[in-house]
Amino acid sequence: MSRRIEIVEVGPRDGLQNEKTLLETGQKIEFIERLRACGARRIETVSFVNPRRVPQMAGAEEIMAALPALPGESRIGLVLNERGWDRCLAAGCEEANVVVCATDGFGIRNQGASTAEQVAALAAIARRRELEGGPPISATLSVAFGCPFDGEVSEARVAALVAEIDAIGVAEIALADTIGVADPWTVRSRIEAARKAAPGAKLRMHFHDTRNTGLANAFAAVEAGIDVLDASCGGLGGCPFAPAATGNIGTEDLVYMLERGGFETTYDLDKLIETATWMSGLLGKPPAASVSRAGGFPASAARTPEQASA
């Protein structure tokens, strides 16, 4: 195959936001620099949220200032409201990712706003971008497969929200399995429903591996024609406002699976393993991603974790 799959690296934001260990700003900068060297071209670099609520995301402006833009790279800033949009503009992000929660239960706990209020905030940001300029906006629909507070999320609700978000006018819409409850068959069905609701929309998928279905869900998405997937180096991740939510699918696991299947990515598997091993040392725990624990195959294709840490 010659089909290329774009992998958006979310480790610096979604990966770190739920960690107990608070990294120094310099360590976060080094993490992003290492990810650049791994081949990451779209990186969820910072989050413009209140650091009192999510202390792991402190130092966003300092991180952006220390990482000048590179040709062909998009430094993504997470935005929840107009204040976050202002910070994103000032920091010079190449992309803003605005989160809309599919349920009120999660939205109020995660963002202090209902779904309708979040959609209104997205619309206000989009209007300002149209009038004042700014980077492209992508929208992530979180808990699109299930909510820890409101339970099952219906396909009809997801489709209606996708249509509403698409009508606002964004560059890309992501469906996020924030708490890792999806299965491959539901993934295919949700993608089909989203396409019917917004035929012209560019879709992205975001999976967590909480119940060991993350890679199976990614496979189902690729089989359904999705070309953009989120992943986190080392399998880091989780939401501080979602009980028992664990990490994203590991970037190295996704790269290994795709490249073994003949797909193209921009990533260097050796360097991903090295970076995951380095980060696991900072956090004081082994990487969750399987490939960083076992190494690539054949052995010459990627060094084992023991070789990477030597």
Image (tube, grey):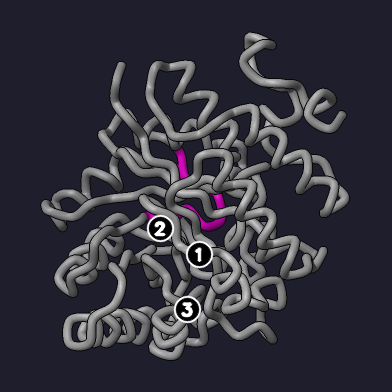
Q: Position of residue 216 (x, y in %)?
A: 48, 31
Q: Residue at x 50, y 60 (%)?
A: 44
Q: Which residue is mark 2?
A: 74
- On the image, which quarter does residue 22 sit in? bottom right
Crowding at dot 3, Cα within 10 Å, few <14 / some 14-19 / many 20+, comes out as: some
For the residue marked with disc 2, what is the amino acid? Ser
Q: Position of residue 59 (x, y in %)?
A: 65, 77
Rounded to the nearest angstrom, the CA distance separating label 2 from label 1 is 11 Å
Residue drawn at x 74%, y 65% as measured from the top left:
26
Position of residue 74 measured from the top left corner of the image (x, y, whole percent):
40, 58
User: Where 255 sits versus 163, above or below?
Assistant: above
Q: Residues within 10 Å of mark 1 (few under 14, many from 20)?
A: few
**179 is within the stretch colored magenta:** yes
- Specify which label sits upstream in the sequence, 3 or 1: 1
- Which quarter of the figure has residue 122? bottom left
Looking at this view, is 73 or 142 the one in front? 73
- Mark sitting on residue 91: 3
Residue that numbered label 1 is attached to? 68
- Tell which circle, 2 or 1, labels the residue nearer the N-terminal end: 1
Q: Amino acid at mark 1?
A: Pro
Q: CA distance from mark 3 to mark 2?
A: 13 Å
Q: Is residue 101 left or right of residue 268?
A: left
Q: Is residue 99 visible?
A: no
Identify the residue at image location x=26%, y=34%.
225
